[in-house]
Every structure is written in structure tokens, then in C-alpha cells.
Image (tube, rainbow, N blue to C red):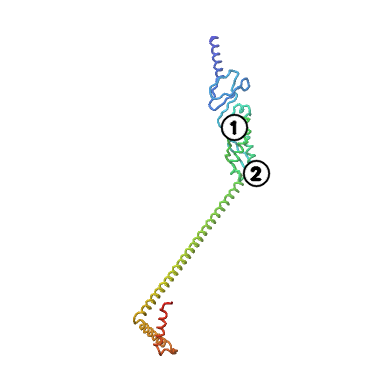
């Protein structure tokens, strides 16, 4: 191999190395930090870029996608001095590649450590019973604290989610007993409520039955009263009609004589009955003069049937 060929090959290798050093393809949703002679020069966004050979170099590569970082389990002490073990997941995103490169050495590690310390602080202000109820509040407070601290890093903290809360065995046993007692209490309350409702329904039924019976008895008495009143009215009307007809009969020809005969017959009949029922009998002085008694009765009837002036 002559010297010309060797020079050509060396030049070709140099060109290849220069192209490899200068040409950069940045993927979508990524950002490359370029330093020129050790100093920040520019940020490369998605696409094809050419650098100055042996002068520019890519120092940092960042993804602009949302990242999920697992926050390891850690022991936290609640306000009522109960130790719990909490782990969670932190979601963040690089919004400024330059600050993420020069603002902090490792923003992922820093965010994870800050999430743990903030979580311990937040849990320490809450009692054990409320740690399960206020997960959303805990998550929100952790996000607010992290987002404020991560601004100089060029990182946006999107959310934090508690994955699990582990309790000591003694606390779990106590909570289980408490929940069992609460369920039994609710069962007793539900049973008593059912019995109370049943008694109320029975009493309401008895009350309604009593009201219905009293209403029926009242209606029966009203109907009987109306029936008796109607009966008395009909008897009175019939009696009045009978008396009217008797009066009309008396005024006809021979009526007075017929009435006298009828009165005499009844007079004799009644005294005959009296004689049968009693051995001793007091006789009126006028008994021997039946005609005089009949005449007196006839005269009374005539005075009654005459109209009042």
C-alpha cells in the first residue's frame, strides 16, 4: 500500500469520525444539551442537527415525557404516635432541559428524597384514623411542596399517589376488632329499628282498626236512631190517620151510636177480665149505669173533635 492510499484512508476515517461527531438526530419529545468547549451553547430539540466537530458535544440528554418514579417505602409516625409504612409513586416532567442539567445533579433522586421527607411531615400532622380517609389531601400537599421546590430544577411535579399504607400487626388487630364491634352495633341498631317500625306499624293498624270500628258503631247508632225516628214518625202518622178516620166515622150517620156501643163493649170486657184475675174487686158507683158512662165518653169525644176557635 503506497502513501497516497494510506493518506486517503486516513482522511476517509477522519471524515467519518467528524460526521459522527457533528451529526445528531434528536428523537421526538426529547432535548439534548450542547456544550461548546465545556460551556452551555444551546438546546437541541427534535430533528436533525449538525455540530462543530471537536468543539461542540452533547453533554445531557433529557426526555420531555412524563416520568413515573417509584418512591420506596418509608416509616412515618402519625400525630397519635403510630408508626406506619408508606410507599407511593411520583409523576414528574422536565419542562426546561437546561435547568434540569445545571440546576441540580440528579433531579430524579432529589425529587424522590424530597417526596419522602414531605410525606413524613404531612403524615405526622394527621391521626391514624384519618390517614386512610385523607389520602387525597396528603397527595395534594406533597405535590404542592415538591412542585415549589422543583421549579429551579426545570421540573414540573404533576401528581403523587400513595400506593399502600402498611400498619403494625397490633394496630391491624385493634382495627379489626373495632370494625367488628361497629358492624355488630349497626346490626343491633338495624334490628331495633326494624322492631320499632314493626311495633309502630302494628299500633297504627290497631289504631286504624279502632277508628274504623268506632266509625262503624257510630254509623250503626245513627242508622238505628234514624230508623227509630222514622218508625215513630210512621206510627204517629198512622195513629193520626186512624184518629182522623175515627173522627170522620163519628160524624157520619150512626157513628155516635156505633162508638157508644163499642165503648160499652170494651167497658164490660175489661171489667170481666178484672173479675177473673182478682177475688176482691172495688166497683165504681157508676158501674150499674153503663149508659151514663158511655154518654160521658161520647160527650168528651165530641168536645175533642170540635175545632178550636
How many numbered discs sit on the rendered protein?
Answer: 2
For the point 59% across and 32% down, the residue is: 156
At which x and y percent is residue 10? 55, 13
The foreground one among 35 and 206 is 206
Query: Toward which corner of the image does residue 119 lie, by quadrant?
Result: top right
Badges 2 and 1: C-beta atoms under 8 Å apart?
no
Q: Nearer the viewer, residue 256 or 271?
A: 256
The image shows residue 223, relative to residue 159, as above or below, that is below
Image x and y of residue 166, in percent: 59, 42
Q: Is residue 264 left or right of residue 179?
A: left
* Label 2: few (<14), some (14–19) or many (≥20) C-alpha neighbours in 10 Å: some
Residue that carries the numbered disc 2 in the rendered image = 79
- Can you tell which mark lies on residue 125? none
The image shows residue 235, relative to residue 171, as above or below, that is below
Quarter of the image that includes the C terminus: bottom left
Q: Which residue is mark 1?
A: 156
Question: Crowding near pointer 1: few (<14 within 10 Å), some, many (20+)?
Answer: many
Closer to viewer: mark 2 or mark 1: 1
- In what element is the residue under mark 1? strand
Q: 254 or 20, which is in the foreground?
A: 254
Any part of residue 299 in sight: yes
Amino acid at each position: 500500500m503506497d502513501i497516497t492510499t494510506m493518506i486517503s484512508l486516513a482522511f476517509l476515517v477522519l471524515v467519518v469520525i467528524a460526521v459522527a461527531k457533528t451529526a445528531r438526530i434528536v428523537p421526538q419529545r426529547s432535548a439534548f444539551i450542547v456544550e461548546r468547549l465545556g460551556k452551555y451553547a444551546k438546546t437541541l430539540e427534535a430533528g436533525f442537527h449538525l455540530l462543530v466537530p471537536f468543539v461542540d458535544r452533547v453533554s445531557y440528554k433529557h426526555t420531555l415525557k412524563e416520568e413515573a418514579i417509584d418512591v420506596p417505602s418509608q416509616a412515618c409516625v402519625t400525630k397519635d404516635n403510630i408508626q406506619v409504612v408508606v410507599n407511593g409513586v411520583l409523576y414528574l416532567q422536565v419542562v426546561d432541559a437546561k435547568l434540569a442539567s445545571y440546576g441540580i445533579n440528579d433531579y430524579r433522586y432529589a425529587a424522590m428524597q424530597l417526596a419522602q421527607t414531605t410525606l413524613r411531615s404531612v403524615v405526622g400532622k394527621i391521626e391514624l384514623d384519618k390517614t386512610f380517609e385523607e389520602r387525597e389531601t396528603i397527595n395534594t400537599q406533597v405535590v404542592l411542596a415538591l412542585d415549589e421546590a422543583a421549579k429551579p430544577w426545570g421540573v414540573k411535579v404533576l401528581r403523587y399517589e400513595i400506593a399502600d399504607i402498611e400498619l403494625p400487626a397490633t394496630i391491624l388487630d385493634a382495627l379489626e376488632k373495632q370494625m367488628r364491634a361497629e358492624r355488630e352495633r349497626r346490626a343491633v341498631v338495624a334490628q331495633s329499628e326494624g322492631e320499632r317500625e314493626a311495633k309502630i306499624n302494628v299500633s297504627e293498624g290497631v289504631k286504624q282498626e279502632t277508628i274504623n270500628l268506632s266509625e262503624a258503631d257510630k254509623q250503626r247508632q245513627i242508622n238505628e236512631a234514624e230508623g227509630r225516628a222514622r218508625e215513630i214518625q210512621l206510627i204517629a202518622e198512622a195513629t193520626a190517620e186512624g184518629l182522623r178516620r175515627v173522627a170522620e166515622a163519628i160524624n157520619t150517620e150512626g157513628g155516635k151510636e156505633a162508638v157508644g156501643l163499642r165503648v160499652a163493649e170494651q167497658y164490660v170486657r175489661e171489667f170481666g177480665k178484672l173479675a177473673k184475675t182478682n177475688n176482691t174487686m172495688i166497683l165504681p158507683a157508676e158501674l150499674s149505669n153503663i149508659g151514663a158512662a158511655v154518654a160521658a165518653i161520647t160527650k168528651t169525644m165530641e168536645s175533642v173533635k170540635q175545632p178550636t176557635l
